[in-house]
Image: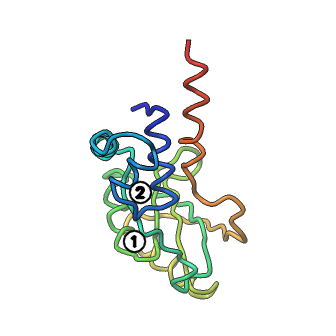
Amino acid sequence: MTIDHLDARLIALLADEPRLGVLECSRRLGVARGTVQARLDRLLSRGVITGFGPDVSTVGLGYDVTAFVLMEIRQVAGHDPVADRLALIPEVLEVHTITGGSDLLCRVVARTNSDLQRVIDQIVDVQGVLRTSSIIALDTPVPYRVLPLVADVPRREVQRP
């Protein structure tokens, strides 16, 4: 789905202030309440907007260590059985199937480096995991973000033929 300038402004507004109501959004954007509601409904139904927070900090929850775990798995039944078991480990935040020398990439958190060993031990115990390799993140100079893509919409609209 492509979004236009008004969609981009609505998304940016809600990203800055997720608790705003439709009426206040319409006032700030200078469009009718019904327009905002229709745009919001469309963005939600098409999966562009996937939620309204709250954004939760893993560090704020006491998980000071972030690591990425590469895994080679036994692919007899595909990735799904392993991913389903990994999803049962609370410290596993994301699982991605990947190309290259490994099959899966996980983002995990732990309270300390020694706690990370416990999390990795749980991962290794998952049936189907053959081998892991871990990388500890030291800092996050650019956190996960999507808004730069949204902000790029007005520029892309000008460049259309």
Which amino acid type is shown beneath numbered disc 2? Arg
- The residue located at (71%, 69%) in the rendering is 139
Image spot of residue 157 (x, y percent): 55, 24
47 with respect to 107 (left or right): left
Q: CA distance from mark 2 to mark 1?
A: 11 Å
Instruction: Please identify, in this view, whether the residue under mark 2 or under mark 1 is nearer the observer.
Output: 1
The x, y position of residue 4, in whole percent, is 46, 31
According to the image, label 2 marks what residue? 74
Up/down of 83 relative to 67, above or below: above
- Residue count near mark 1 (Cα–Cα under 10 Å), binned few <14, some 14–19, many ≥20: some
Secondary structure under badge 2?
loop
Give me the residue at 36% from left, 62% from top. 82
Residue that carries the numbered disc 1 in the rendered image: 126
Identify the image quadrant of the C terminus. top right
Looking at marks 2 and 1 on the same chain, the residue that comes earlier in the sequence is marked by 2
Q: Nearer the viewer, residue 52 or 82?
A: 52
Image height of 14 relative to 120, above or below = above
Residue 142: x, y in percent? 68, 58
Residue found at x 45% / y 59%: 95
Q: In this orientation, which residue lies closer to the viewer: 138 or 129?
A: 138
Q: Residue at 48% of width from left, 61% of height from top?
A: 17
Q: Looking at this rendering, what residue extends furthest in the top direction?
A: 161
> As displayed, is residue 139 above or below residue 145?
below
Q: Are marks 2 and 1 in contact (CB under 8 Å)?
A: no
Q: The disc labelled 1 sits on which kind of residue?
A: Val
Within-10-Å neighbours for mark 2: few <14, some 14–19, many 20+: some
Quadrant for residue 152, please give it.
top right
Residue 106 pos. (x, y %): 51, 62
Q: Quadrant of the N terminus?
A: top left
